[in-house]
Amino acid sequence: MPLKYVLESNLLTKDPNDRYARPVDVRTHTEEDLADAVSKRNPSINKSFYLAMKATEAEVITDWVTEGDSILTKTVHIHPTIPGTVKEGEHPKEAAIKVTPGKLLAEAAKKIRLQHTEPMSQIRIEFVHDIQSNTTNDTITRGGTVKITGYKLKIAGENPAVGVEFLSQEDPEAIYKVTPKNILINNPSELLVIAPRMVVGEKVLVKVTTQYSGTGTPLKSIRSYTLDKELTVIDGGNE
């Protein structure tokens, strides 16, 4: 499949004709998805074994990086770096990690086909990723951090309905709304929020309502989108 993109105005320059390309409809694959794909491609590789192996691999990589080592594989190059500059007589206080494509990914990037598409005119949620459980469109950790990605999601406007809500599928009157202070990132393509204290085991839907227009002037009416995927509330032990 081609990588679809839309052309949008570049607000960082004064040239009204300046545009930048933004990828859209990008699918996100989790470790579970990768394990399923690997075991399907090679049936001799057991999914449980693969996940256990990857978990151990992650521990080894983390240990090596912590020791200041670099890791080079066919897909990625992970290496430490020291950001910023320091003045005479001072020393850097922290390091950072840089990840660049390995040989296979660098070659794969050259083979990506591009397809221009027109931008969507309406709000849409594509993925709801629960940070604590590392799941997508599956679970929600109550009181945990949740990343919502999509299009025209930015929370804007004075209408009382504007905001992020979790709708109970067991109790129609139970609506858990995220307070403004718990919206940590508020961008058109991404929201980062703290999930309300919901009932463990409850099935919920995520709804975003906004008057965001894509310009400096909010819409007169609200726009809402509810992702048609039931998410199970889990307890992250962060009470």
Image: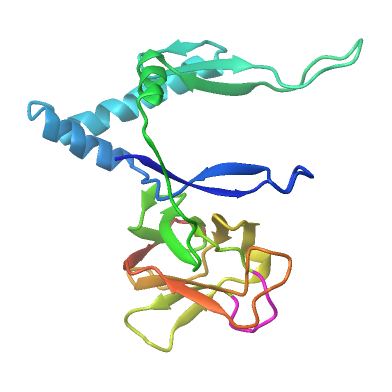
Task: Measuring from the top left, give residue 78's x and y in whole percent.
Answer: 49, 18
In the shown orientation, is residue 203 left or right of residue 176?
left
Relative height, residue 13 to residue 113 (above, below): below
Q: Position of residue 69 (x, y in %)?
A: 52, 10
Query: Please, which residue is most extreme toward the left here?
Result: 44
Q: Which residues are magenta?
A: 156-162
Position of 176 with respect to 159 (left or right) is left
Q: Nearer the viewer, residue 43 or 46?
A: 43
Majority SS type along the magenta span? loop
User: Would residue 46 be seen by someone viewing this image from the given angle?
Assistant: no
Residue at 57% from the left image edge and 80% from the top image edge? 222
Q: Colour scheme in the image?
A: rainbow
Can residue 33 be seen in the rendering of this structure?
A: yes
Q: Where 126 sits versus 6, above or below?
A: below
Q: Position of residue 172 (x, y in %)?
A: 38, 87
In magenta segment, residue 157: yes
Q: Nearer the viewer, residue 8 or 33?
A: 8
**The furthest residue to the front:** 17
Classify residue 185 by image quadrant. bottom right
Q: Is residue 188 left or right of residue 147?
A: right
Residue farthest along the bottom direction in this orientation? 173
